[in-house]
Image (cartoon, rainbow, N blue to C red):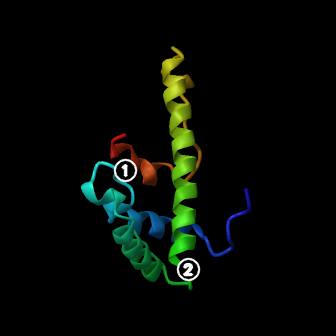
Amino acid sequence: MPPKLKIWTSELEFQLIHEVRSRPILWDISLADYRRNDLKEVHWEEVANKLGHNISSEVAKKRFINMRDTFMENNKKVKESKRSGTGAENIYKPKWPLFQSLSFLLRRTA
């Protein structure tokens, strides 16, 4: 996996999360319009414009997908550690600073 671009500061990543969270069409698969790629492209353009720094919608989308995937991997570790039957002190606690901010993704339905 290539390293993340130097433009992605913690502040900008949190702003990206905020912008995507406010546009459920980009992440909530239970919405009827979720499959409308034409609408999603418009929303990704809006996100990119809000972020500034000459970030394209494609770069913003790729970064968010990477963050989403990392969140899901960490969440899987949490679930697996709970199922293992170990005590509460042994439940996996993600150290990744963006984990809590992305917890809204758990509301999506599969």
- Asked whether residue 45 appears in the rendered view, the answer is yes
| Residue at 50% across, 49% down | 99
Is residue 89 found left or right of 18 in the rendered image? right
- Residue 97, image x, y percentages: 55, 53
Outermost residue, right side: 2
Instruction: Using the image as rendered, state which of residue 105 and residue 98 is in the foreground.
Output: 105
Q: Secondary structure at mark 2?
A: loop
Label 2 vs label 1: CA separation? Answer: 24 Å
Is residue 8 found left or right of 68 in the rendered image? right
- Residue 104, image x, y percentages: 37, 50
Residue under numbered circle 2 = 55
Residue 44, by quadrant, is bottom left
Q: Is residue 32 above or below residue 60?
A: above
Outermost residue, left side: 32
Which residue type does callout 2 highlight? Ile
Is residue 7 found left or right of 17 in the rendered image? right
- Residue 14, image x, y percentages: 48, 65
Q: Is residue 90 above or below residue 32?
A: above
Q: Secondary structure at mark 1?
A: helix
Which residue type does callout 1 highlight? Phe
Q: Is residue 67 above or below residue 86?
A: below
Residue 36, by quadrant, is bottom left
Instruction: Using the image as rendered, state which of residue 32 and residue 106 is in the foreground.
Output: 32
Instruction: Using the image as rendered, state which of residue 102 and residue 42 is in the foreground.
Output: 42
Residue under numbered circle 1 = 104
